[in-house]
Image (cartoon, helix red, strand yellow):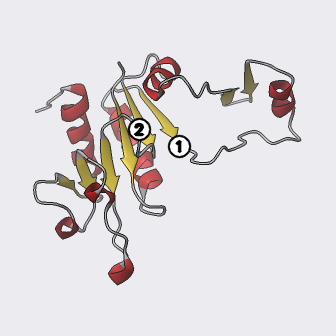
Amino acid sequence: MIPAVSFIGQGGSGKTMLIARLVPLLRARGHRVGTAKHAPHSATLDLADKDSFRHRAAGAERTLVVAESNLALFSERDPEEPLERTIERTFAGCDLVLLEGFKRGPFPKIEVYCPRGQDAPRPLCWEIEVIAAVTTARDLFPPGTRVLSPAEPLRIVEFLEQRLLGETRA
């Protein structure tokens, strides 16, 4: 099974920015990294007036959109297929997959929490088990929670390597 970890947190907490900072650091250390973003509502990823949408609507099992410097593959998701199997199939060849969201999914979770003053929501870790938190608000997390600073992405990478890949570098 390809190691995967879910970065969870409230909207606007910095999950996307953190993942975008971690990917190049992991790649620089020789890791092949995949990413996936949870779309909580059934999202139409290619628009109804586009050819790729028409291909899918006609019944194509998969539709590959190829541009000069990138590509996108669209396919229907079998809701009966376990998420672990979908990730394994989609990211074959990767060493690690960073997921954004999937807070109810089967993968280990790291909460990204950005304090927003007095009306800040309670961290999700009080309801959902997490392996660590990335935050500046250490005091809002239960005792014993591994807290990592968002200002130290290399330490987060080292944590991921140790926890998910079984690596320790000198």
Q: Quadrant of residue 24?
A: top left
Q: Quadrant of residue 152?
A: bottom left
Q: Residue furthest bottom?
A: 118
Q: Residue 156 in the image: x percent, y percent? A: 25, 46
Above or below residue 92? Residue 84 is below
Viewer-closest of 170 and 149: 149
Viewer-closest of 115 and 24: 115
On screen, residue 58 versus residue 111, left or right, reads right
Marks 2 and 1, how far apart in space? 10 Å
Q: Which mark is residue 149?
A: none
Task: Give the labeled residue for mark 1.
Answer: 38
Q: Which one is closest to the eye, mark 2 or mark 1?
A: 2
Q: Secondary structure at mark 2?
A: loop
| Quadrant into which the N terminus falls | top left
On screen, residue 145 versus residue 96, left or right, reads left
User: At 42% across and 62% down in the image, what residue appears?
Assistant: 13
Residue type at mark 2?
A: Gly
Q: Residue 50 in the image: x percent, y percent? A: 86, 37
Q: Quadrant of residue 42?
A: top right
- Sequence-wise, the earlier of marks 2 and 1 is 1
Q: Residue 74 in the image: x percent, y percent? A: 69, 28
Q: Which mark is residue 105?
A: 2
Residue type at mark 1?
A: His
Viewer-closest of 47 and 76: 76
User: At 31% across and 50% down in the image, what residue appears?
Assistant: 128
> Counting other residues with Cα less than 10 Å from the Cα at mark 2, is it few (<14), some (14-19), or many (20 or more)?
few
